[in-house]
Amino acid sequence: MKIVEEIEGSGGLGGVARMTEVIAALEYRRTELIEQLRSQRLASWEEIGQACGMTRQGASRRWSRQAQATSFGDAAAAYRRGRPPYPESAVDWLVPGTARSVLDLGAGTGKLTQLLVARGLDVIAVEPLAPMREELIAAVPQADVRDGSAEAIPLEDGAVDAVVVAQAWHWFDAAKALPEIARVLTPGGTLGLVWNVRDHSVPWVAELDRVLHRHTRVEIDSSPSIGTPFREVERLDVRWEHALTRAELLDLVASRSYVITMPAADRDELMHQVGELLDSHLDLRGRKKLTMPYLTRCTRAQLAS
């Protein structure tokens, strides 16, 4: 094998270090290839597992989260159309009244960014996926939109008074993101996390979730622990309702990461089942406007001064 031949003769710790570098480079390249296969829907998890000498479940567990995290660019327009905004009371709570500059981290298509700009704040929106940034720039041209990630934020030290993360914290590597967020915050600055969670106590919403989770289930911790150097962690839940059309609800489903990364046949079947639910459920059929109940879950923490 050519790679082995290149490092043959390198013994001791130097040889181990060189071998480690080679293995890391190969693993990085393998991940890139798998992400390409999944994003272009060229291979199933079973086929990828066979190619890697693993089971379908093993391959899916190892790479699906990464594939899902980078999948939203494939459905950026649907994401913009179908995802709900956030209640004003939640934004009031997440961003201190004294804040003047705010970083929207993992900003997506700008659902929260738009609300921050409307408050007259100086808003920087950081988003790693180009298709999402394009939607964001079109929707919120007043924001300073930048390419970057939570693990490598393109801001100088102490640049902002508050950092907010909407529907994205679960995609971050918290061990790397927390020091970066602390670095770009002013002393005593605030970190705010927020998720819109569908209210499953409503019968038709519970039935919708049953349909979605028949194919896959994604568990998200919407009340995560926040470690040092943050303190005074607080929680707030806000119940509210979002009016949307049938088309917007279908876009909401289509923009879910696990739906985007499904094989085409499974995705088509899922969308068909959702359409059947809309046509048949007593609370939904014949209605042009729907009301989706949400529980918006908020976490905020303060950076130690």
Image: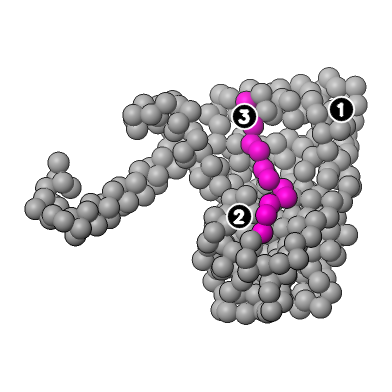
User: Of the residues shown, which amino acid type is indicated by label 2?
Assistant: Met
Residue 70 seen in render: yes
Mark 3 and mark 2 residues within 8 Å of each other at the beta carbon: no
Q: Name the residue beneath numbered marker 1.
A: 203
Asked if 236 appears above or below 189 in the picture, the reply is above
- Magenta residue span: 215-226
- Of the numbered discs 3 and 1, the one sitting upstream in the chain is 1
Mark 1 and mark 2 residues within 8 Å of each other at the beta carbon: no
Q: What residue appears at the point 38 percent right and 29 percent down from the top-left corner?
A: 54
Mark 1 → mark 2, Cα distance in angstroms: 33 Å
User: Of the residues shown, which amino acid type is indicated by label 3?
Assistant: Thr
Q: Name the residue beneath numbered marker 3.
A: 216
Asked if 234 appears above or below 273 in the picture, the reply is below
User: Of the residues shown, which amino acid type is indicated by label 1?
Assistant: Pro
Specify whether residue 25 is painted magenta. no
Give x and y (percent) for residue 208. 77, 28
Judge left or right: residue 17 versus residue 138: left
Mark 3 → mark 2, Cα distance in angstroms: 24 Å
- Of the numbered discs 3 and 2, the one sitting upstream in the chain is 2
The quarter of the picture where the N terminus appears is top left
- Of the numbered discs 1 and 2, the one sitting upstream in the chain is 2
Q: Name the residue beneath numbered marker 2.
A: 132
Furthest-left residue in this view: 9
Closer to us: 173 or 230: 230
Give x and y (percent) for residue 293. 86, 40
